[in-house]
Image (cartoon, rainbow, N blue to C red):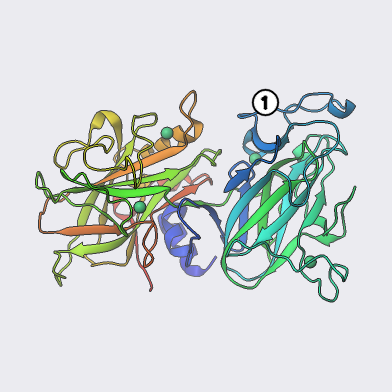
Amino acid sequence: MNPLCNLMSQRLGRAAAAAVCLGVVSFAGAGELIYVEQDGVIVMEAETFSNRTAFSSHDWQVVPTENTGPTVNVDSNTINNPYLNARDGLYMQNFPVQSGGNGGTTDGPFLEYKVQINTTGIWKVYLRASGHDGNSDSMFISLADENGVHIADGTGPDAFGTGTNLIADWYEQTIGGNADFSTSAWKNDGEAEVNAASASGDPTQWNITTPGVYTLRIDPREDGAAVDALTFQHTSTAAPTGMGPYQTDVHITPDADAYVKLDDTSNHGTETGVYVKNAGSSTTTRKGYIRFDVSNVHNLVTDASLQLEVLLNDSGGGDPTPNVVHFNVFGLNDENAGEDWIESGAGSINWLNAPANDTGNGIDAAQTTFLGTFEIPAIHDSVIVEFSDLDSATQNALIDFINDEIADAGGDRDGLVTFILTRVDENGGWNTNFHSSESTSGQAPTLILQFIPEPASALLMGVASLVMIRRRQH
Ligand SMILES: [Ca+2]
Ligand SMILES: [Ca+2]
Ligand SMILES: [Ca+2]
Ligand SMILES: [Ca+2]
């Protein structure tokens, strides 16, 4: 951790300091879930993933919430059901669990984890995984580059590590196990470019020479293979031990963002800005709608924040004296009609159909939860503001709003959370706009989820230090 980050962490608590410590973050596209490197380490709970894809009748499921676990006595073994000692009590397993194996290097149901790498060099994978016997304990791991292209240089004619074959197209890891993650923890040793009964002798690693968003992929070699957690970490960092470190922050970009304009039936979902303006009952009043898909997140968060980059803060004529401006943030209640509002095209969101929209600058309190306010500084543009749980009028309102959706006990499980933005300050001559996910000149709205328990002192901080503001460097 650099001295600035360390100082900021001590003064502001980890959540607030994050914005100045992450460095440049680039996102591959809208609706992405990305783990962001922190000091050379990325720690992932297997059950919070960027993507999962089924193959034939085989898929990865969250145990025990989506599947209560494998059938006992498969392969004539008595197995722990579910497997023991999973971090957070959750893990991913490849189903159906049956005799023998399934999958393959390219045809299995797979899991993907997007990772933002800022530090170049050798990066290693450590798996906390298990099987219940020798027919359920192996999997393949591969990597795609910042363009989504699978990293490979072929499997021959030379043996791996020699001549023209210096990049591992994939690794096999043979885990071994007794359906207890604590006895088969954190495996790095695998074997490159084999599909064999056992694999060992090669550290599972790649040389990353360009910072960017990479994608780790796990394919099962055998059904029943289960992953509790994994790390991707620079070779200069220490291997995990025991239960391992806490899960790294996840950054999520919107699956939809738009604004609605008073009495306007046209759609504004493809514009480069989310325009938010309070002009009272005038038709220039605008409200922002930003939705994130958290359905691939299965661990409850300990903190959360919303980052927005200011696109416009002026009187429309380039007023040389920008204003300090305040905004309200509302959460659209889970299972409220209209959670699945459409960003653009047929049936898309506008003033008349926007969920929880009320007259003038109002928001229907019965359909929403007030999460708090934030302010933007007196700077025209290129400022990233961060609204965190600590800013909220009600302690933990944002955390509770996110965790309600993740836990969603008995609910719709659509995984959708919508934030509605209105401007506090009424001024028909003043324009305020935030970069949308369509913007190519600024940061998309970003939901940051944190899983590390906060020190108690962070909860006692004063309001003044709670909104993180930094100038974007172009
Ligand atoms: Ca190769
Ligand atoms: Ca886990
Ligand atoms: Ca949009
Ligand atoms: Ca929902």
> Is residue 334 in view from this perspective?
yes
| Lateral position of residue 71 relative to residue 297, left or right | right
Quadrant of picture, ligand 2: top right
Which residue has dot 1 on it?
68
Residue 344: x %, y % from top left:
34, 47
Instruction: Classify 15 as above or below 123.
Output: above
Instruction: Classify the position of the N terminus by image quarter.
Output: bottom right
Residue 141 falls in image quadrant: bottom right
- Residue positioned 62% across, 64% down in the render: 145
> Is residue 399 in view from this perspective?
no
| Lateral position of residue 441 relative to residue 146, left or right | left
Residue 347: x %, y % from top left:
32, 40
Disc 1 within 8 angstroms of ligand 2 (CB): no
| Lateral position of residue 60 relative to residue 337, left or right | right
Number of callouts? 1
Residue 450: x %, y % from top left:
50, 47
Residue reaching furthest to the front = 346
Instruction: Classify the position of the C terminus by image quarter.
Output: bottom left
- Residue positioned 82% across, 65% down in the render: 155
Category of crowding for the residue at label 1, using alpha-carbon neighbours closer than 10 angstroms: few (below 14), some (14–19), many (at least 20): few
Instruction: Classify 116 as above or below 218.
Output: below
User: Secondary structure under badge 1?
Assistant: loop
Which one is in front, 249 or 56? 56
Q: Amino acid at mark 1?
A: Thr
- Residue positioned 70% across, 34% down in the render: 57
Which one is in front, 165 or 302? 165
Residue 59 falls in image quadrant: top right
